[in-house]
Image: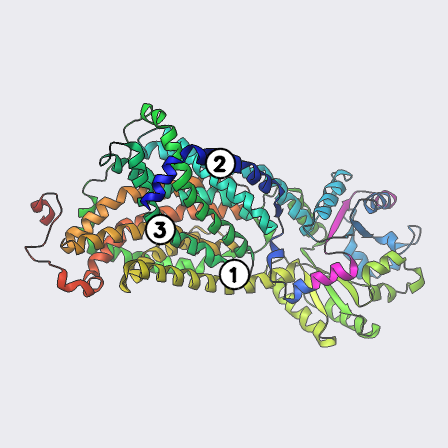
């Protein structure tokens, strides 16, 4: 490792030039990487709802539709507006009253239930269905949404998942650069407090910033990333890789006491950092890799990007950062100042002395923490994470208030089914609680309108060679227990007529999302705990230490995830899955650092009390700096973001860093005191706890007091 360190030092100028040149292709890759704003598209492709989406695209040339509410307009004006919408690129069909009959024909020709579903005479409102020729989050569909909005007035409301995706995109694109700015500013403040030079935070952020750009640019090989991954990647990478830079700097300062030549000191610092940081980063990488085991492939998306980001962060830490430090050595010296962070003198002895108190506190807190952890409410309705001021949210609210409709399902009926069975099936569906209407070709024909009178474009919109499409309006909100039960009843009904029939749409997809992510939560937790357990086992060669360390961090996770239960806060479903894994992978390093020092002290002959007290005292400052860095990178984003999916994740990560910090500083030394005999059982012949045992370098009498 020393030879590698020497080569890096000698090639420092070349490394900096190359790192700057690599920013060009990385920036290009970042710009060209497509961003996916449709969370439901990450559901497994082999489930029925997703297979149904593929059929919609293949057979009907559509995967998306919106309901469009028009208020206070005459029928002729509505018809004119409909004609304009039909001319918008990627709009396949627009279905309204004049799709079936001339405006001169009385509307009472329609069945009363159908008329009431699409009209509200009291509020002078009508509704039309807009069918697009591409999928929900396709660029063409989103462009069409924007154009429809541009030709609409304040009396028109465009609802649907595609409209939500468009608003999510606009809000995310506006906020993401500000996320990075907030994270940089707050991280700079923390570094200015904890480092001994004003220049050092600048170099840290420059090195990490380059690694972030490389990571985001390399996402081009994935084809696309989710907007959540794009929004979180930079701040997360900044938070979890800052430790490595801090370790290198501290190592470099320590080596300067041994070597007067700064280049030689840096070479040794690089060698020491590689040995320590690579081992430390493995647990963080393992936490992110565990996300790749989710059936809901958003976890794969986030896991790959962040695991890649940690690896690139380590590489930048031992190549770019040392080069920057040596090149800007004079600037660093000129901006040197006293470290503001306190030394926490005597904290290690205090905790070791009162370890029983902290163990009792652990048990007392654990009970409500577990309760809260198991009772925190989670929401799955995607537009719930967006501000009420957005057009799509307002449109969905208008649809609910004016037409008492909160969701729309689509049924794919095989053409092997007879017309009579289809009409009977639709009648059965209309009798299911919460169903507002059931619209299909057979319902229109059954209303007394001859087949020849129905325009061909309407027929094509509702029937293909193999399938017939039926729209079902529901009073119930997406992700509610009521709509999930309704979907189950509809599925049972359509299956009773033909098992090939399918129910698709946002509500059925969200129902599948709930089922799948519940399983993912268990599998991801198991994989992350198992992987990190094995890593710690390999590092320490002990079975008891992985149990203690993981238990301490899991205790912190229980507290973090349990708090929303007591504050009455609902968190987005994705947070409940990924936060535990991220917190475990990113903060277990705090516990490993302290445990490494404890074990070293014990094997060097220190008695239990002094080994724990010294390890805690030596570790506390590093743990506080690390936790504050992670907190700084995420806390501001949590406060600022209007997208609750992002805000909640960042708030939980920021709070989790501080809770893990407290758990490791207070609870881990207590656990080491309690389980010292078990932990050191294999070394018992080499240990001494009597009067001849070593004590810390501080006053023996004070230690025994």
Quick check: 36 left or right of 52? left
Q: Nearer the viewer, residue 75 or 134?
A: 134
Q: Position of residue 204 (x, y in %)?
A: 40, 35
Lower position in the chain sequence, tag 3 or tag 2: 2
Q: Earlier in the sequence, mark 1 or mark 2?
A: 2
- Provide the residue designation for mark 3: 280
Q: Is residue 617 one of those drawn in magenta? A: no
Alpha carbons under labels 3 and 2: distance apart: 27 Å
Secondary element under disc 3, as helix, strand or loop, is: helix
Label 3 or label 1, whichever lies nearer to me, is: 3
Cα–Cα gap, marks 1 and 2? 37 Å
Q: Nearer the viewer, mark 1 or mark 2?
A: 2
Residue in the picture at 11% in, 49% down: 695
Q: Residue furthest left?
A: 691
**Labelled pair 3, 1 in contact (Cβ < 8 Å):** no
Tell me the SS state at disc 2. Answer: helix
Distance CA(mark 3)–CA(mark 1): 24 Å
Viewer-side residue, 567 vs 231: 231
Point 74% across, 75% down: residue? 498
Above or below — where is 219 with respect to 469? above
The percent position of residue 487, horizontal first and vertical second, equals: 65, 66
Q: Residues within 10 Å of mark 1 (few under 14, many from 20)?
A: many
Which disc, if any, is residue 72? Answer: none
N-terminal of the pair, mark 3 or mark 1, is 3
Residue 225 in view: no
For disc 1, the marked residue is 294
Q: Which residues are magenta?
A: 52-78
Q: Is residue 57 above or below residue 71?
A: below
**Is residue 62 highlighted in magenta?**
yes
Numbered tag placed on residue 18 in the rendering: 2
Q: Position of residue 277 (x, y in %)?
A: 35, 47
């Amino acid at each position: 490792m020393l030879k590698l360190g020497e080569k890096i030092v000698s090639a420092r100028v070349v490394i900096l030039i190359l790192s700057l040149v690599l920013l060009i292709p990385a920036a290009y890759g970042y710009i060209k990487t497509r961003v996916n704003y449709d969370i439901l598209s990450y559901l497994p492709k082999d489930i029925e709802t997703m297979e149904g989406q593929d059929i919609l695209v293949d057979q009907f040339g559509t995967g998306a539709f919106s309901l469009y509410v028009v208020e206070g307009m005459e029928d002729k004006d509505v018809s004119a507006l409909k004609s304009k919408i039909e001319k918008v690129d990627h709009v396949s069909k627009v279905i309204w009253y004049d799709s079936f009959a001339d405006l001169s024909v009385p509307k009472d020709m329609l069945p009363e239930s159908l008329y009431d579903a699409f009209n509200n005479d009291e509020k002078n409102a009508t509704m039309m269905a807009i069918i697009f020729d591409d999928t929900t989050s396709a660029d063409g569909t989103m462009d069409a949404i924007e154009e429809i909005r541009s030709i609409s007035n304040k009396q028109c409301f465009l609802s649907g998942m595609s409209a939500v995706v468009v608003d999510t995109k606009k809000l995310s694109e506006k906020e993401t650069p500000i996320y990075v700015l907030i994270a940089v500013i707050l991280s700079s403040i923390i570094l200015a407090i904890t480092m001994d030079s004003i220049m050092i935070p600048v170099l840290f952020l420059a090195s990490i910033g380059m690694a972030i750009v490389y990571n985001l640019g390399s996402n081009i090989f994935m084809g696309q990333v989710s907007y959540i991954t794009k929004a979180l990647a930079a701040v997360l990478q900044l938070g979890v890789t800052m430790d490595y830079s801090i370790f290198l700097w501290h190592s470099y300062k320590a080596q300067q006491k041994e070597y007067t030549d700064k280049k030689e000191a840096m070479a040794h610092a690089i060698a020491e950092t590689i040995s320590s940081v690579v081992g430390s980063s493995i647990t963080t990488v393992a936490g992110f890799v565990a996300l790749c085991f989710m059936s809901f492939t958003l976890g794969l998306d986030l896991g790959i990007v962040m695991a890649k980001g940690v690896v690139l962060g380590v590489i930048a830490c031992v190549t770019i950062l040392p080069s920057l430090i040596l090149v800007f050595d004079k600037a660093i010296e000129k901006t040197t100042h006293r470290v503001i962070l306190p030394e926490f003198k005597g904290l290690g002895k205090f905790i070791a002395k009162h370890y029983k108190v902290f163990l009792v506190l652990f048990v007392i807190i654990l009970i409500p923490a577990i309760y809260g952890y198991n009772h925190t409410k989670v929401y799955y309705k995607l537009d719930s994470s967006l501000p009420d001021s957005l057009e799509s949210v307002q449109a969905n609210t208008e649809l609910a208030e004016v037409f008492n409709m909160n969701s729309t399902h689509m049924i794919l009926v095989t053409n092997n089914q007879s017309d009579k069975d289809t009409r009977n099936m639709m009648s059965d569906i209309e009798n299911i609680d919460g169903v507002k209407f059931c619209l299909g070709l057979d319902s229109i024909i059954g209303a007394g309108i001859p087949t020849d009178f129905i325009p061909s474009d309407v027929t094509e919109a509702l029937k293909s060679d193999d399938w017939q499409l039926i729209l079902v309006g529901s009073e119930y909100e997406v992700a509610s227990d009521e709509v999930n039960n309704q979907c189950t009843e509809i599925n049972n009904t359509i299956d009773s007529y033909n098992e090939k029939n399918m129910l698709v749409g946002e509500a059925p997809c969200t129902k599948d999302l709930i089922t799948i992510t519940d399983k993912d939560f268990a599998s991801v937790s198991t994989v992350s705990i198992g992987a990190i357990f094995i890593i710690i086992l390999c590092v320490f060669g002990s079975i008891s230490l992985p149990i203690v360390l993981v238990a301490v961090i899991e205790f912190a996770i229980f507290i973090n995830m349990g708090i929303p239960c007591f504050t009455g806060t609902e968190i987005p479903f994705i947070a409940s899955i990924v936060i535990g894994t991220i917190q475990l992978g990113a903060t277990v390093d705090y516990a490993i650092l302290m445990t490494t020092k404890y074990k070293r002290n014990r094997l060097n002959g220190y008695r239990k009390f002094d080994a724990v007290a010294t390890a805690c005292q030596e570790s506390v400052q590093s743990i506080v700096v690390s936790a504050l860095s992670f907190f700084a990178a995420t806390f501001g984003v949590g406060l600022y973001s209007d997208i609750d999916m992002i805000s909640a994740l960042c708030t939980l990560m920021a709070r989790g860093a501080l809770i893990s910090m407290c758990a490791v500083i207070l609870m881990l030394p207590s656990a080491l005191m309690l389980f010292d005999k078990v932990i050191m059982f294999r070394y018992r012949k080499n240990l001494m706890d009597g009067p001849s045992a070593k004590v810390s370098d501080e006053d023996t009498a004070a230690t025994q007091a």
